[in-house]
Image: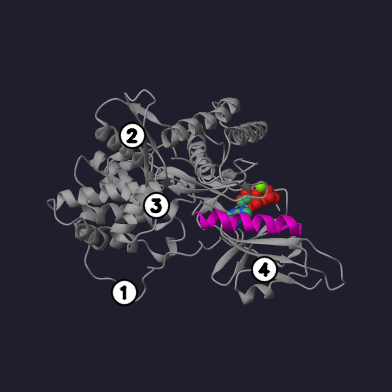
Amino acid sequence: MPLHITGAADAALIELPWEIPLSAWPEEHIAALPRGLSRHVVRFVRHGDGVLAVKETNPEIAHKEFEILRELERHHAPCVHPVAVVSGRTTPGGEELSAALVTEHLSYSLPYRALFSSALRQGTLKRLIGALSVLLVRLHLLGFYWGDVSLSNALFRRDAAEFSAYLVDAETGAMHPRLTDGQRAYDLEIATTNITGELLDLQGSEDLDESVDPFEIGERLEKKYHRLWQALTEASTHTSNIRMRIAERVRELNELGFDLDEIDMQTTDDGTAIAIRPKIVDAGYHQRRLMRLTGLDVQENQARRLLNDLDEYRAWRGGDGDEHYAAHEWLTAMFEPTVRAVPRALRGKLEPAQVYHEILDHRWYLAEASEDDVSLPVATASYVKNVLPQKADEKAVLGRSLAEMTAELPALREEHGDSYERADPYVNDNTHGWGGVPEPEETEPPTVRRQSVLGAASAEGDAASPRSPASADAAGTPATAPSVA
Ligand SMILES: Nc1ncnc2c1ncn2[C@@H]1O[C@H](COP(=O)(O)OP(=O)(O)O)[C@@H](O)[C@H]1O
Ligand SMILES: [Mg+2]
C-alpha cells in the first residue's frame, strides 16, 4: 500500500521521514519538549514554524482517534488539534511500519509529571484535579465518553493561579447523543482508579509529597465532578421570587465560568412551585467576555483576572463611561505595553496573559512589602529583571529576597515612572514576538516555570480581588521533566 496522508492540506507533511520507524527519526526533526507517559511511541517533531506530536499506532485506531478529535473540536471541546493520519508506511526494504496519528503540539502545555521536580505537592495536585473535573464535566455535557480518564491522558496549561486541562488521548473515547448516568459513573470510576494508580506510582518512586493520600485525591475528582455537574444541570424548585432566582442561578453559573443560553421552567405537578433548570451551558464565560471587549483570546481564569484588572482600571480612571472604550484604553495603556516590556528572549517562558497575571501578583507583593503603591511599569520592570529570567533556576529565584527587590524600587520608579510611554518599538509586528511554541532548550533538560515565586499565603477566593495574588501554593521549584520514548 502506498503512503497515504489523510487530513491536513499541508503538502510539507510528506517530506517527513515516514519510511523510518518513529523511534529512529533523526534528531534534527525532534523537538525536546516534556512528554507524558504513553503506551505507544510518541515524539515531537519540528515542522515549519510549529511542532507536531506524532504517535505510532495501528491504522484503525489512528483513524478513529483522528475522527473523535475532529468531532470534539467541532464542539469547541478543549483537546489537541488533529492534523493527519499517515498510513501505508513502509521501509525502503519493504517492511511495513505502524500508522501515525499527527496532532499539533499544544503550546505552553505540560504533562502533569513535568509540573514538579522533587515531589508533586498537595496544592498543585488539587488544582490538577480541579482542572480535570471541569474537563470531564465539559466532555460529558457534550455526550463524550472518555473511557480512559487519567492524569497522563490530559495536558495542563497554566491558567492564572489554576490550571486548565485538555484532552490528549481520545483512543478509547466515543461520542454519544447523550450520556446515561451509568456511563458517566463508569467514566468516573475509571478516572478514580487511574488517578489513584498514578499517584501510587509517584509515591513508590518518592515523587509524591508525603502529606498526599492517593486514595483521598482519587475520590476528590468524583466529589468535584458531582458538585459541578449538579450546579450545571439540576433543576431547583422555587415558590416565589422567580426572576431573582433565575438571576441568581445565572450568576452562579457565570461564577463557575459557564455561560447559559437557555433556561427551562416548569410548574411542579401540584402547581405550587416552579422548577428551573439550565439547558445549554457552555464553558468560557469570562473568556468570551474578554474576547468581546478586547479581542484577547486567553484561558478562562486568565480572562477572569484580566477582567478584574480592567474593571479596576475603569474605576480608577473614573467610572461609568463606555465599557468598550475603557477596554480599548486598558489594552493599549496597560496590557500591551506590559507584554511588550518582556524582552523577546524571555517570551517563550510563559504565555502573555500568564505573564500579565504574574506581574499583577508581583506588584501586589511589592506594594505589600514597601507599604506603598507600585505602578505597573515599575512592577513589570522588577518582574522582568528579578523573576522571569530565573524561572528555570531554583536557586537563583530563591536567592533574591523581597527586601532586596523593594530596596531597588526608588531607582525603578525613577526609571520607569507611573505609566508607560506610548511608543511602540514593534509597531510592525502585531504578535509582539509572542505566539508559536517556546524554543526548546537545546542542551538543558526541559524545564517548567512556576507561578509567583514569592510564596506568601493567601486565602481562597482572593483571585477575585484584582490586586491580590490568586494563590501562592504553586510557588516552588522548576522541574525537570521525565519523558518516555
Ligand atoms: N498534541 C500534543 N501536544 C502535546 N503533548 C502531546 C500531544 N500528543 C501527545 N502528547 C504527549 O504524549 C503523551 C502520550 O500521548 P497519548 O496520546 O496519551 O499516547 P498513548 O495512546 O500511547 O497513551 C501525552 O501524555 C502527552 O504528554
Ligand atoms: Mg495515553
Give the foreground label among 4 and 1: 4
Render colour scheme: one colour
Question: Residue drawn at (14%, 53%), measured in percent from left and top?
Answer: 317
| Number of the label disc, if any, that sits on residue 427 | 1
Give the foreground label among 2 and 4: 4
| Left or right: where 266 falls relative to 31 | left
* Residue at numbered disc 3: 354
* Residue at numbered disc 2: 461
Residue 298 % position (x, y)? 39, 55
Q: Earlier in the sequence, mark 2 or mark 4?
A: 4
CA gap, disc 2 to disc 1? 38 Å
CA gap, disc 4 to disc 3? 35 Å
Segment colored magenta: 55-75
Proximity of marks 4 and 3: CB atoms separated by less than 8 Å = no
Q: Earlier in the sequence, mark 3 or mark 1?
A: 3
Q: Can residue 37 be seen in the rendering of this structure?
A: no
* Residue at numbered disc 4: 6
Local packing at callout 2 (Cα closer than 10 Å; few below 14, some 14-19, many 20+) is few
Proximity of marks 2 and 4: CB atoms separated by less than 8 Å = no
Query: Foreground: 130 or 361?
Result: 130
| Left or right: where 346 falls relative to 30 | left
Residue 379 % position (x, y)? 28, 52
Local packing at callout 4 (Cα closer than 10 Å; few below 14, some 14-19, many 20+) is few
Q: Secondary structure at mark 3?
A: helix
Question: Residue drawn at (41%, 31%), measured in percent from left and top?
Answer: 235
Q: Secondary structure at mark 4?
A: strand
